[in-house]
Every structure is written in C-alpha cells, then in structure tokens.
Image (cartoon, rainbow, N blue to C red):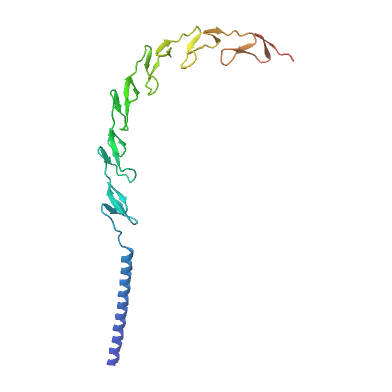
Amino acid sequence: MNRYCNYLGWLIMRKSSIVASTTMLLLASFAAASAQTTVAPTVPDNAIEQSYGQGWSCNTGFREAAGTCLAVVAPANAYLNDRQYGTGWDCLRGFKAANGACREVIIPANAYLKADGESWECVRGFARESNVCRQINVPTNGYLSGSTYGVGWACSRGYRKIHDECEAINVPEYGYLTDLSYGTGWECTRGFSARALECVEVVVPDNAHLTDSGDDWRCNPLFEKQLRRCVGKTR
C-alpha cells in the first residue's frame, strides 16, 4: 500500500513539473515575440518620439534631412517661425526677405512702414513717385482725395477738373448740379430739356403728357403724334 502511494505521489510531481516547464517555455516565447514587436524606433539627436503611432519628429528649430535633424539657421534680423515648411524663419518687422537674407526696408521722407512690416506708404498729402514721396499740390476749390493713384486730389462740388485747376460748372437757369464726373456736370429740371448750354421748357400740346424722363412729351392713349400736336386716332 505504501509503495502504491509513493508511486502515485511521484506521478503527480512529475506531471506538475512538465506543466510548469511548458508554461515557462510559453511565457518566454510570448515575451520574446512582444519584445520584437515593441522595439522602440531609433530617434536621432534633436528629435522626439511621437506620442502616437510610430516614428519621430524634429524639435523646434530643426528640420529632417536624410534621417537626421539639422538646425534651421536664420539670417541676421530674422527669427525662427516653428513652421515645418518654407525656410523656417521670418524677417523682423522693418526687414524683407531677399535671396536668403533680410534686407532693411528703406523708408523715404514723408512715408511710414505699413502694417505688413515689409513695405511703406506715403503719408496723407504726399504721393509715391518711384522711391520718394512728392507733395500733392491741391488747387483752389479742390481737396485731397485720399486715393493712392492719379493726382491725389479732386474738385469740390460745383467745380470740375480742367488740367491742374478746378473750374466752376456753369449751371443754366432751370438746371441743377449732378454728381457725375463726366458730361456737362448739370441736368435740367423736369419739364425742361437741355439745348446747347440752356434748359428749354418742354411745350406739351393738348392730349399729351411728359415722358418719364421729363425732358420730352408723348401723346395720350387713343391719340397719335402729328407734327407738334396730338390728334385722335382714326379707325
């Protein structure tokens, strides 16, 4: 009986040993496989491993080049812009990029640096000519227009530009000024028609009425025009 019990105990111990060995082999294989799949990527100097996915990216101030991170070298009067495209730098305000350098913006007299920081504009009362600002000479009865093109001035209401002067617009009797920059500068009131430099009254015959424009007449319905009068239509 004792011999049987000893033999049974030996079988149980041997089986447990085999199971343990098998388990350890499986765990070792799993660990080796995991180590192969989780090998960290090789991160070059001046770079950081990405927090998601795989790979790495260069630190601020560096650019990727052939698997390495090279420093972005900004020229004088420039600063790094932290962008991953373009040159990687921008010029300081008052300087403009040209041929890989930052050139100072030369501002002439009577001008100022624009909001973009790399160009200039003349102050009010001056107009740009090449690289200088010339004073705008406003004639009598004129005013500064604020326009960046042309002469930079315009004539006051009631005057029109003739060469470099502002001449008065002669409005005839029964006429009024218009805001048009072309034509005579005036129009006739309703019931009058422009003839040369005058406003001539429109004579409306019997059985007629003024047109919508107010400078001519038209026969009423059932009448037709014959010379300067309106006669009834004949069937």
100 vs 190: above or below:
below
Q: Is residue 151 left or right of residue 206?
A: left
214 vs 149: above or below:
above
Which quadrant: the N terminus?
A: bottom left
Residue 144: quarter of image: top left
The residue at the point 28 percent across, 34 percent down is 103
The residue at the point 40 percent across, 12 percent down is 165
172 vs 213: above or below:
above
**78 vs 217, nearest the viewer:** 78
Which quadrant: the C terminus?
A: top right
Q: Is residue 156 left or right of residue 195?
A: left
Q: Position of residue 102 (x, y in %)?
A: 28, 36
Residue extending furthest toward the front: 99
Q: Position of residue 116 (x, y in %)?
A: 32, 33
Q: Position of residue 93 (x, y in %)?
A: 28, 34
Residue 165 seen in the current view = yes
**81 vs 119, nearest the viewer:** 119
Residue 59 seen in the current view = no
Q: Position of residue 84 (x, y in %)?
A: 33, 46
Residue extending furthest toward the right: 235
107 vs 221: above or below:
below
Query: Total number of numbered labels?
Result: 0
**17 vs 140, nearest the viewer:** 140
**93 vs 199, nearest the viewer:** 93
The residue at the point 31 percent across, 80 percent down is 18
The residue at the point 33 percent across, 64 percent down is 37
Q: Is residue 133 left or right of residue 173?
A: left
